[in-house]
Amino acid sequence: MNRLAPRAEPGAVAVARLARLAPLDPAALAALSGATACGRIIGSRRELMREGERVGQPLLLLDGWAGEARLLPDGRRQILSFLLPGDLIGEPGLCDATALSTVVALTDVAVCPAPGPGAVPSLGAAYAAAQRLREACLLGAVTRLGRLDAQERLCDLFLELHERLDAAGLADGGAFDLPVTQEMLADALGLTPVHLNRTLQLCRRQGDLTLRSGRLELASPVQLADRVGRLAFRP
Amino acid sequence: MNRLAPRAEPGAVAVARLARLAPLDPAALAALSGATACGRIIGSRRELMREGERVGQPLLLLDGWAGEARLLPDGRRQILSFLLPGDLIGEPGLCDATALSTVVALTDVAVCPAPGPGAVPSLGAAYAAAQRLREACLLGAVTRLGRLDAQERLCDLFLELHERLDAAGLADGGAFDLPVTQEMLADALGLTPVHLNRTLQLCRRQGDLTLRSGRLELASPVQLADRVGRLAFRP
DNA sequence: CGCCTTGTTGAGCCCTTTCAAAGGATGTGG
DNA sequence: CCACATCCTTTGAAAGGGCTCAACAAGGCG
């Protein structure tokens, strides 16, 4: 089930993504390469963190996708954000707090402990930038769910993922791997799987995208962004 | 229009709310009382910050309500969060960044510059706690908009406001002032004003609340929280 | 007292959900 | 290498929640 293809450099993309958020000095790079060496694989559907429990060691996601979610007592689920390679799970520097959300591995996933920002200021800057980016995405999610219709939501989410994956070097033009089920997308977009599927087909028929065997291609990201009124995040 | 009743102590509730987030030492209290002395009034509907522009001096909201919003090109509006007395507008310590959202005064509002956390660690701790609370509310908003129906959304929002106002000493049992129009509530809940109104009546008929002339009373906050499956935030 | 914003109500339509079932993939075991 | 099981995707039909349009009542404020 979504087995991870072993990469040449386990944490290379994650480190590259952090480095793009803030320039990393040798000390930061050393701390990171020490950490990525301790990576471990966690199976799909496993929980990395549970809402209400103490957050443990903050982690750095090296490979695979995870999801931050809230679970309602009656079984409904809302995915708050997708976590991509290079994203943090839990806030470094904030220990001993209770988790605000549950984090689940959506695919098999590789993680390593996130080095504390303690003695490495450039790493702290990267973490701060990541936190800020996360907030921008959360605000985007609120707007998406509150004021966009199904088709706009879907396109807006795909555009966000494209931006983020592109920043990690994981996008190829308008195309990228989308290793999640339609049900997960539906849980992120506040839709039912059935309606998500229909919306997807609508987008396909309009020529906005193709999605086959876990690979998504956006016909024209910029044009699409303009059409759904998405304003890119510029830090 | 929603004129501010002058208070004996302009920033007392704001300071009290911050103090409840983290114990404030004398240095922090001094910095705050210096700042609150510089408070100024800003009229309803005025913008305090605009998305995409540089954030200016971070502010502390002393009195009145503001709203953090995103505006779509076609006129739709999503209120991301309500800002209450004691809330921060802009992040202290993060200067020279572009704003991620637009902040509007929803009523007449009193603000003062937020003292930088620089030399006062206990103030920094309070700011960090505030930031964390803000994140919890954002996650709550995503879940609300994504997975709750109209009635659940409304009750959940009222419960959040009650919790937050209660922490500021601005709630009286299950009752508090709600100085916003139904249109603003609708913009926060991703509903149309018309449907918000009907939902409100439904809640009234069920005996969950009364709302007259800007004052809301929740019949039984705990019971209601249990019914809509809201889990209180416990730091 | 009259204007203007806000709140309320009605009717019909549309987007999204629900329920149900049939195809397609994918992986496992024989 | 095929058969089977399981998960995921796709499609249909009908119901429902929320939206739109429109008009009217009700307050505040000048």
Image (cartoon, coloured by chain):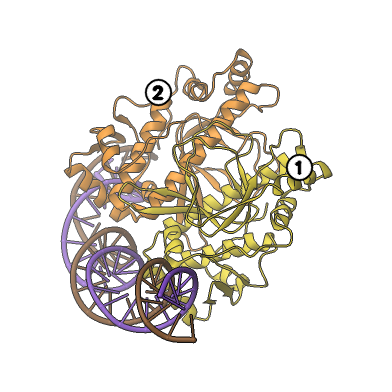
Chain colours: A yellow, B orange, C purple, D brown
Please state which of the two labelled residues, at mark 1 or mark 2, is closer to the viewer.
Answer: 1
The chain identifier of the residue carrying mark 2 reads: B
Q: Amino acid at mark 1?
A: Ala
> In the picture shown, does residue A58 fall above or below A79?
above
Residue drawn at (30%, 52%) of the image: B150
Q: How far across and how far down the image is residue A168, in percent?
A: 68, 59
Of residues A195 and C11, the one nearer the viewer is A195
Residue B97 appears in the picture as rendered:
no
Q: Tag 2, which secondary structure?
A: loop
Q: Is residue B122 left or right of residue A45?
A: right
Residue at image mark 2: B169
Residue at image mark 1: A31
Q: How far across and how far down the image is residue B1, in percent?
A: 40, 38
Q: How far across and how far down the image is residue A178, in percent?
A: 55, 67
- Label 1: how many residues lie within 10 Å, few (<14), some (14-19) or many (20+)? some
Q: Is residue C2 left or right of residue A176?
A: left
- Label 2: how many residues lie within 10 Å, few (<14), some (14-19) or many (20+)? some
> In the picture shown, does residue B122 fall above or below B70?
above
| Displayed quadrant of residue A195 | bottom left
Q: How far across and how far down the image is residue A191, in percent?
A: 38, 62
